[in-house]
């Protein structure tokens, strides 16, 4: 059976899978057991928000197809052919193909568009007199460098010379210490690695509802470290941000995104984010409050290391893994709620020397793991000689 027919059967038989990534992933493993590439690329289209957009379409022209393909290709660093095959498979499965409407066989009326909470604001053209180096790509303008003098407030345009800006790329504003506020215009979808690195005066940023990714898999300009690996610079690393709200459509936040933001006190993460990646909030010494994603699955290596002002953490149901050093150095942490879904604490790609919650002498004497009786978290607490108490405590 052709791939799109298999996917159409999945959609027909398991319609709720389009709103439950874990279920969709499990179904792909069942239906495409020998083809890891196919499973991964189909999930990339889903994670990029494209499937939700398709659900609101009655037809899809070649321009929209091209935009979808480039979004997956650029966002995940995969080959154009693989991105195109995955997008077309989804499109055909949902009764869409370039220049054709939704087929009658798929049931006539299109499904509802995303809810108000997930919707994207209408945007109007915002141009700028500031100077930028940029590159024209087949999917839009990519801003490479801000080459003007610093101002207190900078509005990043969504149109340059009549063409849509889709991305602000790696290190575009690196070292612009005089900028205090940045407004990223609606329509922009990607912020690159280290885009505002070392903007030490930057206290506030306004992000657009159209934003999909903060950080990319493109290592350009990022330093190499031991073992031939790349240390991806964080988009807002070593800025003076005081709070941040990440738009709901963002599905990817790169490593070290807010590392070293010593003034950051509150962070609201998007609801569908699956991972808090390595070092995301490392050394955010003023961080007191984090609104965690409801779909969170993994807290990676050193994600909150050195967050000295954190006092309580309430992880959502569905988290399965808390990696090595995730909360090391959080010396004022009083309690953390760990749900029953967690089946691993420690591990990851670290050296093996970092304790997940830091060394005993780094922790408060009354540090407590809140959990349910019989859970993995309770067994872990006993093994590590950490106080544990009922989640209803």
Image: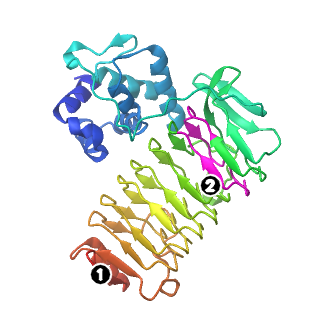
Report x, y in % for residue 152: 76, 48
Question: Residue shown at 48%/83% (left/top)?
Answer: 363
Q: Rounded to the nearest whole Å, what is the CA distance between mark 2 and mark 1?
A: 38 Å
Location of residue 319 with respect to 169 vertically, above or below: below
Outermost residue, left side = 13
Membership of 32 in magenta stretch? no
**Dot 2 alpha-carbon crowd within 10 angstroms: few under 14, some 14 to 19, many 20 or more:** some
Q: Main secondary structure of the magenta part?
A: loop
- Secondary structure under the numbered disc 1 in the rendered image: strand
- Mark number displayed over residue 389: 1
Query: With respect to residue 138, does 134 lie above or below?
Result: below
Left or right: residue 134 versus residue 370 is: right
Q: Nearer the viewer, residue 346 or 271?
A: 271
**Numbered disc total:** 2
Given this view, does label 2 or label 1 mark the residue nearer the observer? 1
Q: Toward the viewer: 66 or 225?
A: 66
Pinpoint residue 94: horizontal percent, then vertical percent. 29, 23
Residue 368 locus on image (x, y percent): 37, 81
Q: Badge 1, how many Cα within 10 Å: few under 14, some, many 20+?
A: some
Picture quarter containing residue 241? Answer: bottom right
Q: Where does the magenta region start and end?
A: 184-208
Image point (51%, 36%), residue name = 210
Q: Is any part of residue 217 visible from this angle? A: yes
Task: Identify the residue position indicated by label 2 in the image.
Answer: 231
Residue in the picture at 64% in, 56% down: 237
Q: Secondary structure at mark 2?
A: loop
Residue visible at 44% across and 44% down?
A: 248
Q: Earlier in the sequence, mark 2 or mark 1?
A: 2
């Amino acid at each position: 059976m052709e791939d799109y027919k298999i996917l159409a059967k999945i959609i027909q038989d398991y319609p709720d899978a389009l709103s439950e990534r874990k279920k969709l992933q499990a179904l792909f493993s069942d239906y495409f057991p020998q083809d890891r590439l196919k499973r991964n690329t189909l999930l990339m289209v889903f994670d990029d928000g494209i499937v939700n957009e398709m659900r609101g379409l009655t037809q899809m022209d070649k321009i929209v197809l091209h935009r979808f393909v480039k979004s997956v290709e650029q966002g995940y660093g995969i080959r154009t052919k693989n991105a195109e095959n995955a997008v077309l498979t989804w499109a055909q499965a949902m009764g869409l193909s370039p220049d054709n409407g939704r087929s009658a066989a798929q049931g006539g009326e299109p499904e509802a568009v995303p809810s108000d909470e997930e919707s994207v604001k209408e945007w109007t053209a915002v141009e700028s007199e500031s100077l930028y180096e940029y590159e024209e790509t087949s999917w839009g303008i990519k801003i490479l460098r801000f080459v003007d003098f610093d101002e207190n407030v900078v509005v990043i345009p969504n149109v340059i010379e009549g063409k849509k800006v889709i991305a602000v790329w790696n290190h575009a504003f690196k070292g612009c210490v005089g900028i205090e506020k940045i407004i990223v215009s609606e329509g922009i979808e990607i912020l690159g690695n280290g885009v505002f690195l070392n903007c030490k005066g930057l206290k506030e940023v306004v992000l657009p509802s159209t934003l999909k990714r903060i950080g990319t898999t493109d290592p350009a300009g990022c330093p190499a470290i031991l073992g031939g690996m790349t240390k991806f610079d964080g988009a807002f690393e070593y800025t003076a941000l005081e709070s941040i709200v990440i738009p709901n459509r963002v599905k990817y936040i790169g490593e070290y995104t807010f590392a070293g933001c010593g003034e950051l006190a509150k962070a609201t993460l998007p609801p569908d984010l699956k991972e808090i990646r390595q070092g995301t909030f490392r050394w955010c010494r003023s961080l007191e409050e984090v609104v965690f994603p409801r779909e969170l699955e993994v807290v990676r290596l050193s994600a909150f290391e050195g967050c000295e002002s954190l006092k309580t953490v309430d992880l959502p149901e569905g988290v399965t893994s808390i990696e090595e050093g995730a909360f090391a150095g959080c010396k004022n942490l009083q309690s953390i709620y760990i749900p029953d879904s967690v089946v691993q604490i420690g591990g990851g790609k670290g050296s093996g020397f970092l304790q997940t919650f830091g060394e005993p002498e780094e922790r408060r004497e009354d540090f407590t793991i809140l959990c349910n009786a019989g859970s993995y978290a309770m067994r872990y607490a006993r093994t590590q000689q950490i106080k544990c108490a009922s989640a209803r405590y």
